[in-house]
Image (tube, helix red, strand yellow):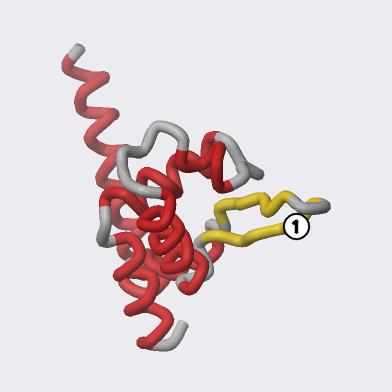
C-alpha cells in the first residue's frame, strides 16, 4: 500500500459518519443509497460525498443491478493496517501474553 493510499484510507476512517456507513454496510451488504442513508440526519448530498470518499479509499464497492446501485463494504484495505505496523513477532508475543493472562486468571478462580 502506498502512502497516498494509506492517507486516503485513514482520512476515510477518520470520520464518525463514514464509520457508521461502513458499519451499516457490514451489517446489511448491498444497500441502495436511499436504504443506506435511512436514519442519518445529514442530507443525501452530504452522505453521497461521504460515500464518494469511502469509494475513493476502496472501502466501498458499488455494483449496478439494473437501475439500482448497490453498495458493499470492501474489507481488503483494512487488512493493510495491521500488516504495516503489527509484525508477526508482535502478534505472537501478544497472543502468548493473552494466553498467560487467561491461564493465570483461571488458576486464581
Residue drawn 36% across the image and 38% down it: 40
Residue drawn 26% across the image and 61% down it: 14
Q: Is residue 83 above or below residue 15?
A: below
Q: Is residue 77 left or right of residue 47?
A: right
Secondary structure of residue under mark 1: strand
Residue sticking out furthest to the left:
108
Q: Is residue 79 visible?
A: no
| Residue toward you, 86 or 60 | 60
- Label 1 neighbourhood size at 10 Å, few (<14), some (14-19), many (20+)? few
Q: Is residue 47 left or right of residue 56?
A: left
Q: Is residue 103 above or below residue 19?
A: above
Name the residue beneath numbered marker 1. Answer: 64
Q: Is residue 21 above or below residue 56?
A: above
Can you tell which quarter of the image residue 105 is in? top left
Q: Is residue 45 left or right of residue 60?
A: left
Locate residue 45, reporting x and y percent. Answer: 41, 57
Locate residue 47, reporting x and y percent. Answer: 40, 53
The quadrant of the rendering that contains the C terminus is top left
Locate residue 73, reporting x and y percent. Answer: 56, 52
Residue sticking out furthest to the right:
66
Locate residue 75, reporting x and y percent. Answer: 53, 57
Amino acid at each position: 500500500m502506498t502512502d497516498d493510499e494509506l492517507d486516503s484510507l485513514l482520512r476515510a476512517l477518520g470520520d464518525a459518519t463514514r464509520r457508521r456507513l461502513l458499519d451499516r454496510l457490514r451489517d446489511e451488504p448491498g444497500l441502495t443509497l436511499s436504504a443506506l442513508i435511512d436514519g442519518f440526519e445529514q442530507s443525501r448530498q452530504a452522505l453521497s460525498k461521504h460515500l464518494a470518499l469511502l469509494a475513493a479509499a476502496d472501502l466501498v464497492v458499488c455494483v449496478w443491478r439494473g437501475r439500482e446501485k448497490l453498495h458493499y463494504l470492501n474489507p481488503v484495505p483494512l487488512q493493510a493496517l495491521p500488516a504495516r505496523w503489527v509484525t508477526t513477532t508482535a502478534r505472537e508475543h501478544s497472543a502468548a501474553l493473552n494466553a498467560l493472562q487467561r491461564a493465570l486468571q483461571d488458576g486464581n478462580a
